[in-house]
């Protein structure tokens, strides 16, 4: 049961990040650069072949102008609360 919850949360995070990237026009390379990791690592994580490091998720959230809790809540929840970043926004500065 716990494994199902973890897989479900990872799937939600991956879907949310992909949709945020599409909305803002950011590429895997952009997100990878902001985290200081390779695009291949981002690709593996977004495809579900590798798990996100818990310390990377707040950085991903900040990259998109969100909190950790917002990032993990789902894209639909972000839309419902009006917290989606603007389309094609200039978000995405390197996050330390």
Image (cartoon, rainbow, N blue to C red):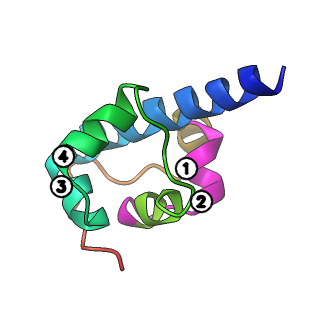
Quick check: 30 left or right of 95?
left
State the SS at label 3.
helix
Label 1–label 2 contact, CB within 8 A: yes
Magenta residues (range): 63-74
Marks 1 and 3, the one that precedes in the sequence: 3
Q: Which mark is residue 68?
A: 2
Q: Nearer the viewer, mark 4 or mark 3?
A: 4
Q: Which mark is residue 39?
A: 4
State the SS at label 2.
helix
Q: Nearer the viewer, residue 76 or 57?
A: 57
State the SS at label 1.
helix
> Where is residue 56 shown, x and y percent of the image?
46, 60
Quick check: 78 left or right of 41?
right
Say few, some or many: other residues with alpha carbon within 10 Å of mark 3 (under 14 / 14 to 19 / 20 or more): some
Q: Which residue is painted at 15% across and 49% down in the image?
A: 29
Q: Which mark is residue 30?
A: 3
């Amino acid at each position: 049961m716990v494994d199902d919850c973890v897989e479900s949360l990872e799937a939600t995070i991956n879907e949310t990040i992909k949709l945020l990237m599409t909305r803002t026009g950011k590429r895997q390379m952009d997100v990878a650069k902001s985290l200081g990791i390779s695009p291949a690592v981002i690709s593996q994580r977004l495809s579900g072949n590798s798990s996100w490091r818990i310390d990377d998720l707040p950085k991903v959230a900040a990259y998109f102008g969100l909190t950790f809790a917002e990032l993990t809540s789902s894209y639909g929840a972000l839309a419902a609360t009006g917290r989606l970043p603007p389309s094609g926004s200039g978000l995405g500065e390197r996050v330390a």
